[in-house]
Image (tube, rainbow, N blue to C red):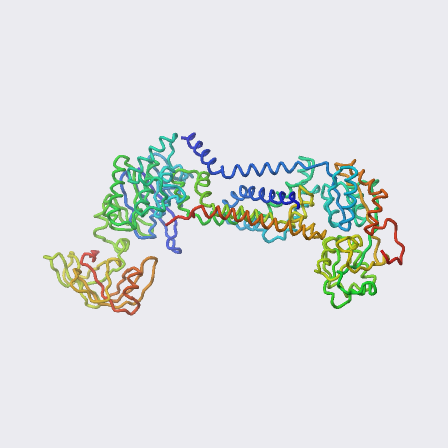
Amino acid sequence: MHRNASTRFAQNFQFAHGRFLRPAALALLCLLAISVSASQELRVAAAADLQFAMKDLAASYEAKTKQVVTIIYGSSGNFFTQIQNGAPFDLFFSADISYPQKLIDAGLAERPTLYSYAFGRLVLWAPPDSHLNLAVKGLSALLDPQITKIAIANPEHAPYGKAAVAALQKAGLYDQVKSKFVFGENISQTAQFVQSGSAQIGLIALSLAISPAMQNGERWLVPADLHPLLEQAVVLISASKNNAAAASFLDFVKSAESKTILAKYGFTTAQISAGETKP
Amino acid sequence: MNLQALLLSVRLALTVALLLLVLAMPLAYWLAFTKWRGKFLLESIVALPLVLPPTVLGFYALILFGSRGTIGKLWQSLFGHPLAFTFTGLVLASLLYSLPFAVQPLITSFESLDRRLLDASSTLGASPGRTFLRIILPLSWPGLVSAFVLSFAHTLGEFGVVLMVGGNLPGITRTVSIDIYDRVQAMDYSGAHRMALLLLVISFAVLAAVYSITRRVWSPWPAR
Amino acid sequence: MLSIDIEKQYHSQGSSSFQLQIKEEFSPGFTVLFGPSGAGKSTILDCIAGLQTPDAGRITLGDEQLYDAGRKVVVPPQSRKIAYVFQSLALFPHLSVAENVGYGISASSGAERRAIIQSASQAFHIADLSGRNPRQLSGGQQQRVALARSLATDPRVLLLDEPLTGLDAHFRETILQDLRAWNASKRIPILYVTHNREEVDAIGERVVALSQGLVIAAGNPRAVLDAPRAMALAQAAGFENLLTTRVANLRPADGVMDVVLLPSNKHLEVPLGTGQVENPIRVAIRAGDILLATEMPRSISARNILPGKVESMETCGTLVVLQVNAGAHFVVHVTPAAVRELSLAAGAAVWLVVKTHSCHVLAD
């Protein structure tokens, strides 16, 4: 009787569960298959202002070495948090040097590899037909009544956002315009807000403003002395499993060819003297 | 056209939907049939992901599954890398995120069963396990379908959780929704449009296929 | 031999709560549990089957303890080998007739299993319905499938909860015949719950009458039901009308007597009782035995035609309950279709039609 019951149970189990066992097993297989990740690729966490510049750098490097470079763009502050929690990046290009420095202090990045690759610049940008006359008015164009939304990067964690707030405060315009802010999660999203017309004007990175997608707009370079330096730096993450490839890419970034590419996107590799307004 | 991201999203949604069917069933069974007075506590916990913003869930997932979190550290000692920023990490976070979408339809199905059918099964000698497999499950078919479809759809559309705990790694955690987001930020609008449209078409096709199958299955409710 | 001695608090009609107390022994053969709804009959069956647990007591089958509160023994329903046919039948709608009948069979080989299904199906004349789905069957066929399914498991006790309601007398009789034939060889206790008097008469073995959780009479059907003695039992047997009357005239030649309805002095012809003229006597009539007419009926066999007025109407499920004043307060049951066709409403003038033998004389 007992054996009959268990046989019957097994039959019924198979009958009813047949519907579920096979798909579930398939699911598990899929799960396992994905866990095997490609460790030959080099994973680079890049600040959003490198959106176009890094693509060129990586393409050039890949052509030379056949090494696949995978780039993930985002906000420097977010990358910092993710790396603290074990995000598997090999290199971290930050728009603000303080983040890599904090990682080094926390023992998560290699001090000898810290390299300041550029200084970022903040620009005021508006779409081509805005007629806001930025060249003449500069920051005070923000007070124009037709402006209802001003895009800046989130100052909580994005370096360009912090710089934008600092510049506006120093120019004495912050309190008048702060109610019109819309915050981009990173400087790329900020640029996209203005480019798409969701905001009428924005404070974005020079590297994005002169990119093909945005170079037709009106722009005005914010004087460097209005905000703290946007010193950008790259560092090797200690937990990286690709030290050789990472070091090789870093060397490439320091090369003259890279400097040319970076300069093309408005990244200056030396400090700017005050008073310079033309990009 | 990023097929990799698309395949990843579909694989994630499918994995989660199937796993949830299996995991949500005992939970739904217990919640449907127990008379425990503290039932409302468990019901509230299960329903939490419905009201929590995805970023809250993603945040806690990041903290817990990351290299500094309890679960992440355990995982690291077992597998050599943290649980966050992996497909498995996404699956686990998504299981929590979509749990109520699987549990609720199942509970509704189980509760609307004629109890006398279960009694009949018992008096005819079937153990609770056999009653579950031969009577409850087949008669709860609409609930199972709903649970699958809802958790599949919900996971497919996930963004906040994936963003927080995924790390946007191509081929591993860069789902379609993240990819579309990336393209918009890179101002590649045509690329974003192509991906979004494809996702829409695929989602619609899956739903249509599932609902057409359901139509052909008879209605399980007793005549009397 | 099934013996039970249990107590259980149960709820009937939603709010009211009763204490069920029953101590009975059931030998092989039919025992009818008779009583109105709410008497606790289904609760007793549930406890015997193990679907509900009593508050206290013991249930024993042969020498096996199925339930013992003192020694904390509770055998689960799937291990009791007690078959139960519910009022709703609970046929599995996603399985065919053959699969339903075979559900509880614990045979080791497929051939043996098929043989048992076949013999049970043949015993209840449903062998030709094997492939069909239960919902495609008529009421009578469904009852048979439910019976075949329960009996295919070779149970030690069979519990039937109002299994034949809604069937007409012919089908009822054939099913009962099949059941009796089946039990002739098996000889197990069969507990048959009903509130319908005709079924009690049809089965004709032992009757246990229940009201509000207590056994008020037990024994031979004639003894228990034909001459209801206690008011409680009269109500239990479903008489909604209990009229106070006075004997006016005895007509032994016709086997009837005339009584006067108090206080209106209207006359009723009822079966001959043992009272004398001027004796007060109570007459019980079922609401379902009273016919209603909106025109005075002519050339009709019924002996009692009482003019009256509808005081109120209320729909209860599939019935409409009318309160009618026809010299005394009457409760009458009609169908909703009748209400529509006769345009019945409160205030309507009606005639109540009652056969002599629908009036039951109570001796108390």
Task: State left or right for residue B49 relative to residue C2.
Answer: right
Q: Nearer the viewer, residue C197 or B139?
A: B139
Looking at the image, is A143 positioned above or below residue A39?
A: below
* C227 relative position to C193: left or right: left
Where is residue C109 drawn, in percent x and y? 38, 30
Q: To which quarter of the image does residue C232 belong?
A: bottom left
Q: Quadrant of residue C295?
A: bottom left
Residue C135 or residue B119, whichever sits in front: C135
C329 displayed left or right of A152:
left
Q: Is residue B138 left or right of residue C154?
A: right
Residue C309 lies, with reference to residue C104, above or below; the image says below
- Residue C168 x %, y %: 26, 50
Q: Give the x, y percent position of residue A271.
A: 88, 51
Q: Residue furthest left?
A: C253
- Of residues A100 and A32, the one drawn nearer to the viewer in this rendering: A32
Residue C5, how many percent across, how many down?
Answer: 34, 43
Which residue is rendered at x = 48% and y = 50% of the image?
B108
The answer to whether residue B131 shows anywhere in this view is yes
* Residue A107 shows in the view: no
Pick the residue in front: C221 or A224: A224
Q: Residue at x 53, y 46 (%)?
A: B148
Please state the total of marks drawn on the protein image: 0
